[in-house]
Image (cartoon, rainbow, N blue to C red):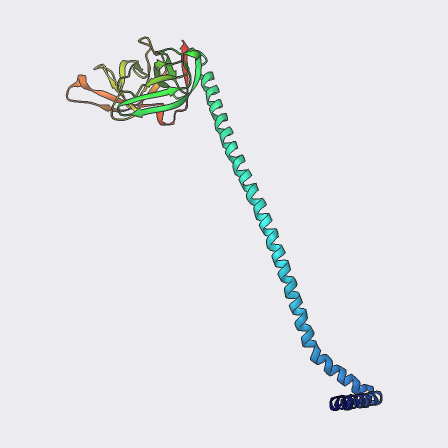
Amino acid sequence: MGENRHIGILGTIITVIILILLILLTNVDTSKMSYFKSLGDKISRPIQVGFTNLKNKISGNDTFFATMDELKEENKSLKEKNEELSENMREYEVIKAENELLKEKMNLTEKYSAYQTVSADVINKDISNYGSNLVLNVGSNDGIKEKMTVISDQGLVGYILKVSKDTSTVRVITDPASRVSCNISTTNESVMCQGTLDNDQTLRVTYIPLDADVIVGDSVETSGVGQIYARGIHIGIIKEIITTTNQTDRYAIVETAVDFSKLNTVLVITSN
Protein backbone atom coordinates (compact mmCIF):
# COMPACT_ATOMS: atom_id res chain seq x y z
CA MET A 1 0.00 0.00 0.00
CA GLY A 2 2.73 2.45 1.00
CA GLU A 3 4.56 1.93 -2.26
CA ASN A 4 1.47 2.55 -4.37
CA ARG A 5 0.84 5.72 -2.39
CA HIS A 6 4.34 7.04 -3.15
CA ILE A 7 3.87 6.29 -6.87
CA GLY A 8 0.57 8.17 -6.87
CA ILE A 9 2.12 11.23 -5.23
CA LEU A 10 5.04 11.19 -7.72
CA GLY A 11 2.64 10.99 -10.65
CA THR A 12 0.66 13.93 -9.30
CA ILE A 13 3.81 16.04 -8.94
CA ILE A 14 4.93 15.25 -12.51
CA THR A 15 1.50 16.16 -13.86
CA VAL A 16 1.54 19.50 -12.02
CA ILE A 17 5.00 20.30 -13.39
CA ILE A 18 3.91 19.56 -16.95
CA LEU A 19 0.85 21.81 -16.55
CA ILE A 20 2.98 24.66 -15.23
CA LEU A 21 5.40 24.33 -18.14
CA LEU A 22 2.55 24.40 -20.65
CA ILE A 23 1.17 27.57 -19.10
CA LEU A 24 4.57 29.22 -19.16
CA LEU A 25 5.21 28.25 -22.76
CA THR A 26 1.89 29.61 -23.97
CA ASN A 27 2.62 32.95 -22.32
CA VAL A 28 6.32 33.27 -23.25
CA ASP A 29 7.32 36.03 -25.69
CA THR A 30 8.35 34.63 -29.12
CA SER A 31 11.52 36.72 -29.02
CA LYS A 32 12.54 34.82 -25.89
CA MET A 33 11.71 31.58 -27.62
CA SER A 34 14.03 32.52 -30.47
CA TYR A 35 16.75 33.07 -27.89
CA PHE A 36 16.33 29.56 -26.58
CA LYS A 37 16.20 28.24 -30.13
CA SER A 38 19.43 30.09 -30.97
CA LEU A 39 21.03 28.75 -27.84
CA GLY A 40 20.00 25.24 -28.80
CA ASP A 41 21.41 25.72 -32.28
CA LYS A 42 24.73 26.83 -30.84
CA ILE A 43 24.86 23.75 -28.67
CA SER A 44 23.76 21.32 -31.36
CA ARG A 45 25.79 22.76 -34.29
CA PRO A 46 29.25 21.44 -33.17
CA ILE A 47 27.67 18.04 -32.70
CA GLN A 48 26.18 18.17 -36.21
CA VAL A 49 29.50 19.32 -37.69
CA GLY A 50 31.30 16.51 -35.90
CA PHE A 51 28.91 13.92 -37.27
CA THR A 52 29.20 15.43 -40.75
CA ASN A 53 33.02 15.29 -40.64
CA LEU A 54 32.91 11.75 -39.40
CA LYS A 55 30.60 10.79 -42.23
CA ASN A 56 32.88 12.47 -44.77
CA LYS A 57 35.92 10.69 -43.42
CA ILE A 58 34.17 7.36 -43.60
CA SER A 59 33.07 8.12 -47.16
CA GLY A 60 36.61 9.21 -47.99
CA ASN A 61 38.01 5.91 -46.73
CA ASP A 62 35.57 4.06 -48.92
CA THR A 63 36.79 6.10 -51.90
CA PHE A 64 40.43 5.48 -50.93
CA PHE A 65 39.98 1.72 -50.84
CA ALA A 66 38.04 1.82 -54.09
CA THR A 67 40.88 3.82 -55.66
CA MET A 68 43.46 1.34 -54.37
CA ASP A 69 41.59 -1.53 -56.01
CA GLU A 70 41.47 0.40 -59.29
CA LEU A 71 45.21 1.12 -59.09
CA LYS A 72 45.97 -2.55 -58.48
CA GLU A 73 43.95 -3.54 -61.54
CA GLU A 74 45.60 -0.83 -63.62
CA ASN A 75 49.05 -1.91 -62.44
CA LYS A 76 48.28 -5.52 -63.32
CA SER A 77 47.10 -4.45 -66.79
CA LEU A 78 50.22 -2.32 -67.35
CA LYS A 79 52.45 -5.20 -66.25
CA GLU A 80 50.79 -7.54 -68.73
CA LYS A 81 51.18 -4.95 -71.51
CA ASN A 82 54.85 -4.47 -70.59
CA GLU A 83 55.49 -8.21 -70.79
CA GLU A 84 53.72 -8.30 -74.14
CA LEU A 85 55.84 -5.40 -75.44
CA SER A 86 59.03 -7.09 -74.20
CA GLU A 87 58.07 -10.29 -76.01
CA ASN A 88 57.33 -8.32 -79.17
CA MET A 89 60.71 -6.59 -78.88
CA ARG A 90 62.51 -9.95 -78.58
CA GLU A 91 60.66 -11.23 -81.64
CA TYR A 92 61.57 -8.03 -83.49
CA GLU A 93 65.27 -8.46 -82.64
CA VAL A 94 65.18 -12.07 -83.88
CA ILE A 95 63.49 -11.04 -87.13
CA LYS A 96 65.95 -8.15 -87.52
CA ALA A 97 68.93 -10.48 -87.05
CA GLU A 98 67.47 -12.96 -89.54
CA ASN A 99 66.91 -10.18 -92.08
CA GLU A 100 70.46 -8.90 -91.67
CA LEU A 101 71.80 -12.43 -92.12
CA LEU A 102 69.68 -12.92 -95.25
CA LYS A 103 70.84 -9.55 -96.59
CA GLU A 104 74.47 -10.50 -95.96
CA LYS A 105 73.99 -13.76 -97.85
CA MET A 106 72.40 -11.96 -100.79
CA ASN A 107 75.23 -9.41 -100.90
CA LEU A 108 77.79 -12.19 -100.82
CA THR A 109 76.10 -14.06 -103.64
CA GLU A 110 75.95 -10.91 -105.79
CA LYS A 111 79.57 -9.99 -105.04
CA TYR A 112 80.84 -13.40 -106.09
CA SER A 113 78.35 -14.00 -108.88
CA ALA A 114 81.22 -15.18 -111.11
CA TYR A 115 81.42 -18.34 -108.97
CA GLN A 116 78.95 -21.10 -108.28
CA THR A 117 78.48 -20.96 -104.53
CA VAL A 118 76.53 -22.33 -101.60
CA SER A 119 75.80 -20.00 -98.69
CA ALA A 120 76.35 -21.32 -95.18
CA ASP A 121 76.10 -20.26 -91.54
CA VAL A 122 78.90 -20.70 -89.04
CA ILE A 123 77.48 -22.90 -86.28
CA ASN A 124 80.66 -23.45 -84.29
CA LYS A 125 84.09 -21.84 -83.92
CA ASP A 126 87.34 -23.22 -82.64
CA ILE A 127 89.75 -20.30 -83.03
CA SER A 128 92.87 -20.50 -80.89
CA ASN A 129 96.64 -20.24 -81.12
CA TYR A 130 96.86 -23.99 -81.69
CA GLY A 131 94.27 -24.41 -84.40
CA SER A 132 91.61 -22.50 -86.26
CA ASN A 133 88.52 -24.29 -87.53
CA LEU A 134 84.93 -23.41 -88.27
CA VAL A 135 81.90 -25.67 -88.55
CA LEU A 136 79.27 -24.89 -91.20
CA ASN A 137 75.66 -26.00 -91.46
CA VAL A 138 76.12 -27.47 -94.96
CA GLY A 139 77.60 -30.80 -96.00
CA SER A 140 77.71 -33.44 -98.72
CA ASN A 141 73.91 -33.30 -99.03
CA ASP A 142 74.40 -29.69 -100.20
CA GLY A 143 77.12 -30.58 -102.70
CA ILE A 144 80.04 -29.64 -100.41
CA LYS A 145 83.34 -31.45 -100.93
CA GLU A 146 86.78 -31.34 -99.35
CA LYS A 147 89.24 -28.64 -100.49
CA MET A 148 86.53 -26.27 -101.68
CA THR A 149 87.29 -22.59 -101.09
CA VAL A 150 85.41 -20.71 -98.39
CA ILE A 151 85.03 -16.92 -98.59
CA SER A 152 83.22 -14.08 -96.83
CA ASP A 153 82.27 -10.55 -97.78
CA GLN A 154 85.71 -9.32 -96.61
CA GLY A 155 87.81 -11.97 -98.31
CA LEU A 156 89.35 -15.41 -97.98
CA VAL A 157 88.29 -17.59 -95.03
CA GLY A 158 89.88 -20.97 -95.76
CA TYR A 159 89.01 -24.31 -97.30
CA ILE A 160 86.83 -27.31 -96.54
CA LEU A 161 88.82 -29.79 -94.47
CA LYS A 162 86.18 -32.42 -93.60
CA VAL A 163 82.63 -33.11 -94.73
CA SER A 164 79.68 -34.98 -93.25
CA LYS A 165 76.16 -35.25 -94.63
CA ASP A 166 74.88 -32.05 -93.02
CA THR A 167 77.97 -30.20 -91.79
CA SER A 168 81.49 -29.39 -92.85
CA THR A 169 84.69 -28.24 -91.14
CA VAL A 170 86.71 -25.32 -92.48
CA ARG A 171 90.43 -24.87 -91.89
CA VAL A 172 90.81 -21.11 -91.82
CA ILE A 173 93.86 -19.34 -93.22
CA THR A 174 95.10 -18.33 -89.74
CA ASP A 175 95.57 -21.97 -88.75
CA PRO A 176 99.32 -22.74 -88.37
CA ALA A 177 98.89 -25.69 -90.73
CA SER A 178 97.42 -23.46 -93.46
CA ARG A 179 99.53 -22.17 -96.38
CA VAL A 180 98.28 -19.94 -99.19
CA SER A 181 100.16 -18.98 -102.34
CA CYS A 182 99.69 -15.20 -102.71
CA ASN A 183 100.53 -12.16 -104.76
CA ILE A 184 101.43 -8.72 -103.42
CA SER A 185 99.29 -6.18 -105.28
CA THR A 186 101.85 -3.41 -105.90
CA THR A 187 104.68 -5.64 -107.09
CA ASN A 188 102.79 -8.75 -108.22
CA GLU A 189 105.45 -10.76 -106.41
CA SER A 190 104.57 -14.34 -105.49
CA VAL A 191 104.89 -15.09 -101.78
CA MET A 192 103.59 -17.59 -99.26
CA CYS A 193 101.15 -16.74 -96.44
CA GLN A 194 101.02 -19.00 -93.40
CA GLY A 195 99.07 -19.00 -90.15
CA THR A 196 100.93 -18.32 -86.93
CA LEU A 197 100.71 -19.24 -83.25
CA ASP A 198 100.91 -15.60 -82.23
CA ASN A 199 97.60 -14.12 -83.29
CA ASP A 200 94.31 -15.29 -84.79
CA GLN A 201 94.10 -12.26 -87.09
CA THR A 202 97.54 -12.30 -88.71
CA LEU A 203 99.52 -14.29 -91.25
CA ARG A 204 103.25 -14.48 -91.88
CA VAL A 205 104.43 -13.73 -95.42
CA THR A 206 107.58 -15.65 -96.34
CA TYR A 207 109.66 -16.35 -99.44
CA ILE A 208 109.78 -12.65 -100.27
CA PRO A 209 112.16 -12.13 -103.24
CA LEU A 210 115.30 -10.17 -102.37
CA ASP A 211 114.57 -7.51 -104.97
CA ALA A 212 110.85 -7.19 -104.07
CA ASP A 213 109.92 -3.69 -102.94
CA VAL A 214 107.33 -4.61 -100.33
CA ILE A 215 105.77 -1.78 -98.31
CA VAL A 216 103.32 -1.49 -95.44
CA GLY A 217 99.76 -1.18 -96.74
CA ASP A 218 100.23 -3.48 -99.72
CA SER A 219 97.23 -5.68 -100.47
CA VAL A 220 97.70 -9.45 -100.56
CA GLU A 221 95.55 -11.73 -102.75
CA THR A 222 95.45 -15.38 -103.71
CA SER A 223 97.68 -16.22 -106.69
CA GLY A 224 95.63 -19.14 -107.96
CA VAL A 225 98.65 -21.42 -107.75
CA GLY A 226 97.71 -24.81 -106.33
CA GLN A 227 94.50 -26.80 -106.44
CA ILE A 228 92.45 -25.06 -103.75
CA TYR A 229 92.11 -21.29 -104.07
CA ALA A 230 91.01 -19.35 -107.12
CA ARG A 231 93.04 -16.32 -108.17
CA GLY A 232 92.38 -12.78 -106.92
CA ILE A 233 90.60 -13.40 -103.61
CA HIS A 234 91.54 -10.73 -101.09
CA ILE A 235 93.43 -11.93 -98.02
CA GLY A 236 94.57 -8.86 -96.13
CA ILE A 237 96.97 -5.92 -95.82
CA ILE A 238 100.67 -5.92 -94.95
CA LYS A 239 100.98 -4.11 -91.65
CA GLU A 240 104.64 -4.77 -90.75
CA ILE A 241 107.89 -5.81 -92.44
CA ILE A 242 110.54 -7.56 -90.37
CA THR A 243 114.13 -7.40 -91.64
CA THR A 244 116.81 -9.59 -90.08
CA THR A 245 120.59 -9.68 -90.44
CA ASN A 246 120.07 -12.34 -93.06
CA GLN A 247 118.21 -10.67 -95.92
CA THR A 248 116.79 -13.99 -97.07
CA ASP A 249 115.01 -14.41 -93.75
CA ARG A 250 112.97 -11.23 -93.91
CA TYR A 251 109.22 -11.61 -93.65
CA ALA A 252 106.08 -9.52 -93.38
CA ILE A 253 102.98 -9.63 -91.19
CA VAL A 254 99.58 -9.51 -92.89
CA GLU A 255 96.45 -8.52 -91.03
CA THR A 256 93.59 -10.60 -92.38
CA ALA A 257 90.65 -8.82 -93.97
CA VAL A 258 88.25 -11.22 -92.29
CA ASP A 259 87.49 -10.74 -88.60
CA PHE A 260 87.04 -14.38 -87.65
CA SER A 261 85.65 -13.56 -84.20
CA LYS A 262 82.62 -11.89 -85.87
CA LEU A 263 82.21 -14.24 -88.81
CA ASN A 264 78.67 -15.62 -89.13
CA THR A 265 78.00 -16.15 -92.83
CA VAL A 266 80.21 -17.54 -95.59
CA LEU A 267 80.09 -18.85 -99.15
CA VAL A 268 81.53 -22.14 -100.30
CA ILE A 269 82.76 -21.98 -103.89
CA THR A 270 81.58 -25.20 -105.49
CA SER A 271 82.85 -24.38 -108.97
CA ASN A 272 85.21 -21.69 -110.34
Left or right: where 16 falls relative to 219:
right
Q: Which residue occupies the foreground of this view, 83 or 271?
A: 83
**Numbered-mark total:** 0
Residue for point 19% across, 22% down: 243
Q: Which residue occupies the foreground of this view, 33 or 134?
A: 33
Q: Position of residue 46 (x, y in %)?
A: 67, 76
**Residue 203, quarter of the rendered image:** top left
Quadrant location of the N terminus?
bottom right
Please determine whether, in this image, residue 82 is positioned above or below residue 239: below
Residue for point 25% across, 26% down: 198
Residue for point 49% across, 22% down: 102
Residue 115 is at least partly visible in this image: no
Q: Which residue occupies the foreground of this view, 191 or 131?
A: 131
Q: Position of residue 261 (x, y in %)?
A: 36, 27
**Residue 125, quarter of the rendered image:** top left
Q: Position of residue 272 (x, y in %)?
A: 40, 9
Please determine whether, in this image, residue 79 is positioned above or below residue 196: below
Task: Tell which residue pokes out farthest to the front in this image.
Answer: 1
Left or right: where 82 falls relative to 200:
right
Task: Tell which residue pokes out farthest to the left in this image.
Answer: 245
Q: Position of residue 124 (x, y in %)?
A: 37, 24
Q: Which residue occupies the foreground of this view, 123 or 238?
A: 123
Please determine whether, in this image, residue 27 is positioned above or below residue 114: below
Residue 104 is at least partly visible in this image: yes
**Residue 211, quarter of the rendered image:** top left
